[in-house]
């Protein structure tokens, strides 16, 4: 799997060559995207009495869309009652067939319990791209059996667990998002349910997004129909589809009230969204060029993009190879190296706010015992040196040469246990004193994250965990989605060590909120300072004396505390009357989050190694000048 490490080199080289490119629409022709695996289900044998829900007794979430007012008269040609009961699946259909229809009526049953999905009845797959020859093992294109618990809140079908589920499957872990349940007149008294799910490559950050649907009469379920036709994954793209045997087991969920309340709170606290096309309507005098947003990215490889301005998240749709994704607002987007900024760097700023700025200069050797047997010299390397990618321990100083080399291949691809990862992370030899030269290593972020974790344990006791520290002190108060409050860890275990440099999973609302916290809110959540202002200012390029280290030998790109930055001058655009900097987060394969000094944010998630966002910055300047 060594080719994947080479992709890191190609990705970041292309990022540094970012230029204005032509418009790339996010609309994809039907039948052009990626997917996941097959499932199974047993067919119901008889209709059972329905359970009636009194809309007047619905909880507060009814005010947020849980109460449906449709007639139930839905004209359906795809995924009909007969289609779902038959257990047959000829191939993917338009993803809209899984979505809540306009005339959906309130469900007449209550789903609270376990949905077990087992062997596939009629399954299929199509490989779109396979750089690492994954499909040579057919088991990788098989959906693992699932046992999922849900509660119902009006017309919302809410998973009991929305966080990353570490399975025992050799290839796939799982995430499940909130779905819907409703009534259609053509379903013979059954309610119809659907929900989004994501296959997450084990020990990696690829996300393959899919959707499932089934019929339910209060006691029994139809076969579950599923398809996966979209991903953010450079090297492995595929479609999966099928129908699977399934059973329903009623289960009393003790925390049902808390689950409903958390879902309702998350919906209530999402940023307002509008289609990206509304920028023209909202700012007619700016003469904004919409084609600049999403430009330079191949349309079939764009997952989603957005532009945040004046508190509004202007968003694209979420196209799959078979139409628009049914649950765009809940689609899981991988962090890759944006986690270096939004988790590892945020963790250090949050520690600095709680325990003081002295945390930044703590020595790695004092908190990571494995440093004593490292190939290099870690005696003077601080946590901040490691986040700056300036440890002085490296093989080759050329741009991204180490990141694409054999040690990093072993660290990224060939190790899953903590013992193996930390061993490979410490294999780089000593070259010079820390803080002098920038050499990019994802392993350095892993080491820094481990050091922060062990410092936190020293301060707060053996149960402390650096990711949970950020989750509870930053992500939860920021109202990030429940799924964003989990991370990849070593040993494929929820008790393993957080990766630090990659391994988180966003929605478009999540990444917008994190960017606003950093760029617009000065590290404050509802007036409470959660990120230490000094290091935040350095990370956001607000101190001219602390730009960070050159990444290419040219001063136009810098790196500071897990954040990249690009310099802009009047020669870049006649509209610029000053020199300014835009910090940005960057992720493997084609992910960028740009934090602009005028308060706007541009983000996109794609997977064809394309990094293009100059045009978006230039257009943002029309709305509000970057220069005072």
Image (spheres, rainbow, N blue to C red):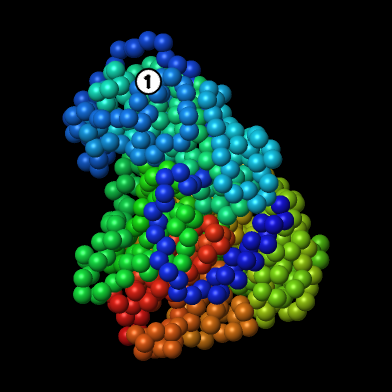
Give the x, y percent position of residue 134: 66, 44
Point out the image quarter for the C terminus.
Answer: bottom left
* Residue drawn where x is 49% and y is 47% of the image: 33
Q: Nearer the viewer, residue 519 or 257?
A: 519
Q: Is residue 105 left or right of residue 114?
A: left
* Residue drawn where x is 48% and y is 86% of the image: 544
Give the x, y percent position of residue 608: 54, 59
Give the x, y percent position of residue 70: 20, 33
* Residue drawn where x is 52% and y is 86% of the image: 545
Q: Is residue 328 left or right of residue 454?
A: left
* Residue drawn where x is 48% and y is 42% of the image: 229
Badge 1: residue crowd in 10 Å (few <14, some 14–19, many ≥20): few
Q: Is residue 561 above or below residue 218?
A: below
- Kindly give the residue lying farthest to the top in the view shown: 46
Q: Is residue 58 left or right of residue 196?
A: left
Q: Nearer the viewer, residue 475 or 296?
A: 296
Q: Is residue 357 above or below residue 484?
A: below
Residue that label 1 marks: 82
Which quadrant of the view contains residue 375? Answer: bottom right
Q: Is residue 491 above or below residue 343?
A: above
Which quadrant of the view contains residue 125? Answer: top right
Give the x, y percent position of residue 361: 62, 73
Q: Is residue 200 visible?
A: no
Q: Nearer the viewer, residue 457 or 426?
A: 426
Q: Of helix, strand and loop, which one carries label 1?
A: helix
Q: Is residue 291 above or below residue 151?
A: below
**Circle count:** 1
Q: Is residue 236 visible?
A: yes
């Amino acid at each position: 799997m060594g080719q994947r490490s080479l992709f890191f080199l190609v990705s970041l080289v292309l990022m540094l060559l970012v230029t204005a490119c032509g418009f790339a629409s996010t609309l994809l022709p039907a039948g052009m995207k990626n997917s996941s695996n097959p499932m199974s289900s047993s067919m119901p044998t008889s209709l059972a009495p329905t359970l009636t829900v009194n809309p007047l007794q619905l909880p507060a979430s009814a005010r947020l869309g849980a109460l449906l007012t449709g007639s139930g008269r839905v004209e359906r040609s795809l995924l009909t009652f007969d289609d779902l009961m038959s257990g047959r699946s000829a191939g993917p259909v338009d993803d809209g067939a899984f979505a809540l229809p306009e005339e959906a009526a309130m469900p007449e049953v209550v789903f609270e319990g376990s949905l077990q999905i087992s062997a596939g009845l009629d399954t299929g797959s199509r490989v779109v791209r396979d750089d690492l020859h994954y499909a040579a093992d057919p088991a990788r294109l098989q959906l693992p059996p699932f046992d999922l618990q849900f509660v119902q809140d009006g017309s919302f079908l809410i998973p009991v667990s929305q966080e990353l589920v570490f399975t025992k499957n050799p290839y796939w872990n799982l995430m499940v998002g909130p779905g819907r349940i409703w009534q259609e007149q053509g379903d013979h008294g059954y309610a119809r349910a659907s929900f989004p799910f994501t296959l997450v490559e084990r020990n990696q950050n690829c996300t393959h997004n899919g959707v499932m649907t089934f019929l339910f009469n209060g006691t029994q379920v139809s076969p579950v129909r599923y398809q996966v036709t979209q991903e953010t994954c450079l090297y492995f793209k595929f479609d999966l589809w099928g129908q699977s045997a399934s059973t329903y087991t009623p289960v009393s969920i003790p925390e049902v009230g808390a689950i409903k309340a958390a879902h309702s709170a998350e919906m209530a606290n999402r940023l307002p969204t509008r289609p990206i096309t509304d920028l023209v309507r909202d700012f007619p005098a700016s003469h904004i060029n919409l084609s600049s947003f999403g430009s330079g990215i191949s349309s079939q490889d764009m997952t989603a993009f957005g532009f945040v301005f004046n508190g509004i998240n202007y968003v694209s749709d979420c196209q799959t190879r078979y139409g628009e994704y049914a649950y765009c607002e809940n689609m899981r987007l991988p962090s890759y190296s944006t986690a270096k900024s939004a988790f590892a760097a945020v963790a250090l700023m949050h520690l600095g706010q709680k325990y003081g700025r002295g945390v930044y200069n703590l020595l790695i050797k004092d908190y990571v015992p494995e440093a004593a047997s490292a190939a290099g010299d870690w005696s003077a390397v601080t946590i901040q040196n490691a986040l700056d990618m300036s440890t002085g321990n490296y093989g080759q100083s050329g741009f991204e040469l180490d990141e694409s080399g054999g040690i990093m291949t072993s660290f990224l691809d060939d190790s899953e246990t903590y013992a193996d990862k930390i061993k490979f992370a410490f294999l780089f030899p000593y070259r010079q004193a820390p803080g002098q030269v920038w050499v990019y290593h994802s392993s350095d972020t892993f080491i820094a994250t481990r050091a922060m974790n062990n410092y936190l344990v020293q301060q707060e006791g053996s149960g402390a965990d650096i990711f949970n520290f950020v989750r509870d002190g930053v992500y939860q108060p920021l109202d990030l989605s429940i799924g964003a409050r989990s991370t990849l860890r070593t040993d494929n275990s929820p008790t393993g060590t957080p990766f630090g440099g990659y391994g988180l999973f966003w929605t478009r609302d999540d990444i917008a909120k994190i960017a606003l916290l950093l760029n617009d809110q000065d590290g404050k959540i509802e007036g409470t300072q959660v990120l230490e202002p000094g290091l935040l200012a350095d990370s956001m390029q607000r101190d001219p004396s602390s730009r960070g280290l050159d990444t290419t030998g040219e001063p136009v790109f810098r790196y500071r505390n897990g954040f990249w930055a690009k310099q802009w001058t009047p020669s870049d655009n006649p509209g610029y009357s000053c020199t300014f900097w835009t910090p940005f987060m960057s992720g493997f394969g084609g992910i960028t989050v740009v934090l602009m000094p005028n308060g706007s944010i541009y983000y996109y998630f794609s997977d064809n190694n394309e990094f293009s966002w100059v045009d978006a910055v230039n257009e943002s300047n029309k709305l509000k000048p970057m220069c005072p």
